[in-house]
Amino acid sequence: MLDAGVPDGTVAHAVALLEGAADALRALSRAPARVTVDVEAVAAHVLLPAVLAAHHGEPGWPRPATPRRAPGDGHLAADLGAPGDDESYELLLSTLPADADAGQVERAAQLWRLPVVAYRPPAAGGRRRRAGGARPGGPGTRREAPSWWLAGDATVAPLRGVRVVDLTAMWAGPLATWSLATLGAEVTKVEPAVRPDGLRGQPHLFAALDRGKAHVDLDLRRDADMAELAARIAAADVVVDSFSPRVMPNLGLDPATLADLRPGLVSVAIPAFPAGSPQRSWVAYGTGVHAFCGLGRLPGSGVAAPAVTYPDPLGGFAALAAVLRGLAAARQPGAGAVHLEAPLVNAVAPLAARPGGTGLLRPVEPVAEELATRLAARGFFDAEGLPRSPLVVEGPG
């Protein structure tokens, strides 16, 4: 079973998300192109930390946080990886009643901007509302035919000439922007030296999702660096960010301002929770989204973290599809700027509607080892042991 260590149906759902990206890419191509989704490669990307560890002969990899018991009832997904998080969490608990349940701890932790989310029953995630579609960046905003659309051979590098400013970190956003780079886009990752991407703690995974990108060190607390970022956005076609929703407006980069900087810009945000939800401003990572959507519940009263943070690759594939749809929308005559969101909860919630069963109970190691061996024989890994994209674009078919 390819869904070892993640909820049943995860790989099939990931394939469906990538099929949506493939449809959008076909619509963008000027010449007939064969765009296919490699199912085994999708499975490898869903389980990528485990597959890379198996391929490189390493005994393990950093796993998602084990559920923590609340002082009272319930369990919590606490992704406390930043310096000082554990100390802040213990201080937070000292301010709460001795019998505080998971919901009380969650609400207090989010006020402290700590990524702590209570494990919920499965029905909670399935009823979450979805974010809306594309919306104009500002009234009357128009664009000329984009330069990237006039350049390149669509059957070889369909996004050749597309300029992407990458404001993402960890797994979901970097997967989306790396996928754009594999399609020929020029991706520039903004990574300040004062706050490097947390994914660097997993060197193979970081390397896998960083290929083909240029880097620029910009400390966005400095006016000069913010001015340089604005100039880069003004010359870009796409901006992708994975900040919590308050960050871009706090930087003065809300969708309307982005549209002013670059009429016709496609901007895609990857928050944890969708617009209009009570949790909109919460801080959460993949394990927290897993808990929130009710996918960590086991038969009986138990809970479990996944073997890998599968909401991230699902969110990355959804964000890739959003960028491609945005580029198609921006291509239309008289189109204005396009802003889309690909919330992690929206990418994961369909899994919560599936009845019965849980792949969380199946050990991931044998599946990862078998996948790594089989895919290596197919040339899936390059000379450095890094994987290729599961979205395959070939010549006219």
Image (spheres, grey):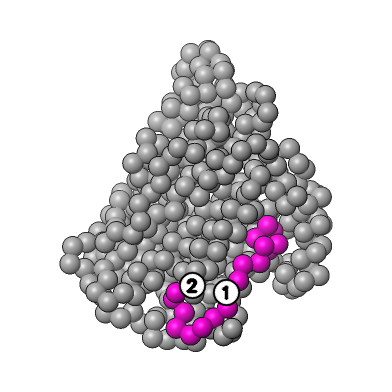
Disc 1 on helix, strand or loop? Answer: strand
Residue at image location 33% in from the left, 79% down from the top: 146
- Do callouts 1 and 2 mark residues in contact (Cβ within 8 Å)? yes
Q: In this view, does 204 lie above or below 311?
A: below
- Quadrant assignment for the C terminus: bottom right
| Residue underneath mark 1 | 35
The spot of residue 40 in percent (x, y) is 70, 62
Q: Name the kind of residue labelled 1 in the image.
A: Val
| Residue underneath mark 2 | 25
Query: Which corner quadrant of the image does residue 255 belong to?
Result: bottom left
Q: Name the kind of residue labelled 2 in the image.
A: Leu
Residue at image location 81% in from the left, 50% down from the top: 366
User: Residue placed farthest to the front in the image?
Assistant: 355
Magenta region includes residue 362: no
Q: Is residue 51 left or right of residue 349?
A: right
Disc 2 on helix, strand or loop? Answer: helix
What segment carries the magenta color? 27-44
